[in-house]
């Protein structure tokens, strides 16, 4: 699974973490889509909404769907932290995804007044988790996710 995990990290770094809002393709039903391909793998992230938002990441090998992750999250901006700043920090966290746990960002990352935490159980075969962003100790963002090999 190492080559798949490496692909997944690259896909995440080259989609939402780099392009974010505005870099996606808009589908007729309002869905936003980001995609990445490399070799025999194809990654697709489709999401709906802005705040709250929900979506699905799907990886194909050839024409076969082999991995899936669903997610749902929301942002609660507070004084001193705008939604744009929170999502910008989130993108920085997602760029730090690792091959050992490529679901979202690292287990913990801090910068300035922001702290990111990612708690999960399982592995690429089957997993679930929750990430949160704190600004000056106050929760300003939460996302739950789950998925695994198909």
Image: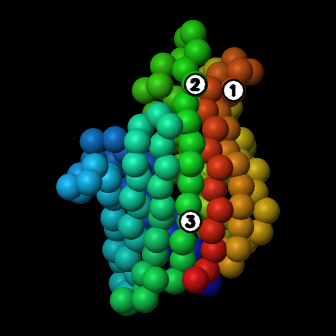
Q: Residue at x 75, y 57 (%)?
A: 120
Does residue 21 appear in this view? Answer: yes
Do the residues bearing badges 1 and 2 touch, measured as CB atoms within 8 Å? yes
**Residue 145: image location, x then y, percent:** 63, 56
Numbered tag placed on residue 95 in the rendering: none
Q: Residue 69 carries which label?
A: 3
Residue displayed at 55% across by 11% down = 80
Q: Could you say which is closer to the camera, residue 53 or residue 124? A: 53
Label 1 close to label 3 by CB (< 8 Å) = no
Quadrant into which the C terminus falls: bottom right
Q: Is mark 1 on a helix, strand or loop?
A: strand
> Residue 76: which quarter of the image?
top right
Residue 45 location (% of width, % of height): 41, 61
- Quadrant for residue 50, please give it: top left
For the view shown, which residue lies furthest in the top direction? Answer: 79
**Above/below status of 72 relative to 147:** above
Circle 1 is placed at which residue position?
139
**Nearer the observer, 92 or 140:** 140
């Amino acid at each position: 699974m190492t080559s798949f995990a490496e692909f997944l990290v690259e896909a995440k770094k080259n989609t939402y973490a780099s392009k974010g809002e505005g870099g996606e393709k808009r589908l007729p039903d309002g869905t936003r889509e980001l995609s990445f391909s490399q070799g025999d793998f194809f990654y697709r992230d489709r999401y709906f909404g802005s705040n709250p938002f929900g979506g699905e990441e799907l990886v194909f090998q050839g024409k076969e769907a082999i991995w899936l992750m669903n997610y749902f999250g929301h942002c609660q901006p507070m004084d001193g932290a705008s939604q744009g700043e929170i999502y910008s920090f989130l993108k920085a966290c997602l760029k730090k995804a690792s091959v050992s746990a490529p679901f979202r960002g690292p287990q913990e990352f801090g910068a300035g007044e922001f702290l990111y935490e990612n708690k999960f159980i399982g592995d690429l075969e089957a997993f679930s988790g929750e990430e949160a962003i704190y600004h000056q100790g106050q929760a300003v963002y939460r996302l739950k996710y789950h998925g695994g090999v198909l």
